[in-house]
Amino acid sequence: MLDVILHSFIWRAIIAIAIAAAVSSTVGTFAVLRGFSTLSAAITHSSFAGASMAIICGVNPLLGALALSLGFSGLTAYASSANERKADVMVGMIFGFSTALAVFFLSMAGSYASAAWSFIVGDVLGVSWSDLLTLLTVSIISVGSTCLFYKEFKFITFDPEAAEAMGLRVSAYHYLMTTLVALFSVVAVKVVGVILATVLLIAPAAAAYEFSHNLEGMILLSLAISMVSGFFGFFLSLAVNLAPSPLIGIAVSAAYLLALVASPKRRRCGDLARHRVVKGA
């Protein structure tokens, strides 16, 4: 086991998981609080279509994933800025259209099909130094933007009407938030693949929400959950000689399920409901 850990590809994988956890904790927190879970799933699917297209064209797949996911996130933000029902329509369209594009490009991929399929299940052990540089650049932009506009994000998340009344450009920050979700999808598809990317974005933040009483605590706890579950799944995969992506996804999902069971918020709600029933009787 120790001999395996000393290899450079293992350390690249560890760094990639840490990067994904950092982006997940910041972007995922706002995605959960603003109800972006279905949006993130649609954008992640579009990133797979972009990666497939890039492989055929001989371009870095991560750049192709970034280009298409940014395009679709912009369309969704534009649709939802006027009407939330239109956002649902756009998300459904993205699911169907991006899947059709992915299948189309895969049919043209030929000998490159295996490389394209790796984005479905993830290939964290195959992260190269150039991939790592791309992931690091994306994460710096994502986390940096969140830190730079933290107060504005917090304001429009909890009280968008008051934020707009005070002259804050809510639609502009909405566009930026969807862009950050698109950036995360580029990091996630390389670490855990298209199928599990949404779980990596939503589950840690949703688990942290069950124990947090303020936004800052939720972000920090989400980071801890992402890191611990990500590394647990990865090192378990090395120990049992299985693919790391599904085990990381299972570990993150298990963390959320455990949080639901142990949630003090839900216990208090249950106690309050029982108290009302007894009082009414």
Image (tube, rainbow, N blue to C red):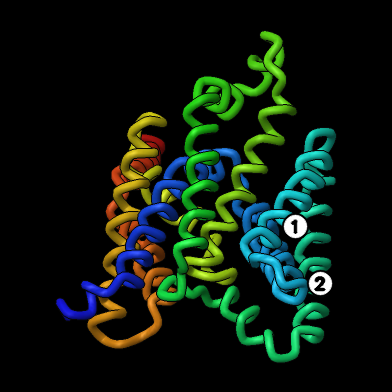
Q: Quadrant of residue 109?
A: bottom right
Circle 1 sits on which residue?
Answer: 68
Tell me the SS state at disc 1.
Answer: helix
Compare residues 10 and 130 and report the one nearer the observer.
130
Are the residues tagged 1 and 2 within 8 Å (C-beta)? yes
Three-letter code for the amino acid on which mark 2 is drawn = Leu
Compare residues 35 and 62 and report the one nearer the observer.
62
Q: Is residue 133 above or below residue 280?
A: below
Q: How many marks?
A: 2
Tell me the SS state at disc 2.
Answer: helix
Three-letter code for the amino acid on which mark 1 is drawn = Leu
What number is the disc on residue 101?
2
Q: Position of residue 161 (x, y in %)?
A: 68, 19
Q: Quadrant of residue 255?
A: bottom left
Compare residues 56 and 139 and report the one nearer the observer.
56
> Mark 1 to mark 2: distance in Å?
11 Å
Q: Is residue 75 left or right of residue 214?
A: right
What number is the disc on residue 30?
none
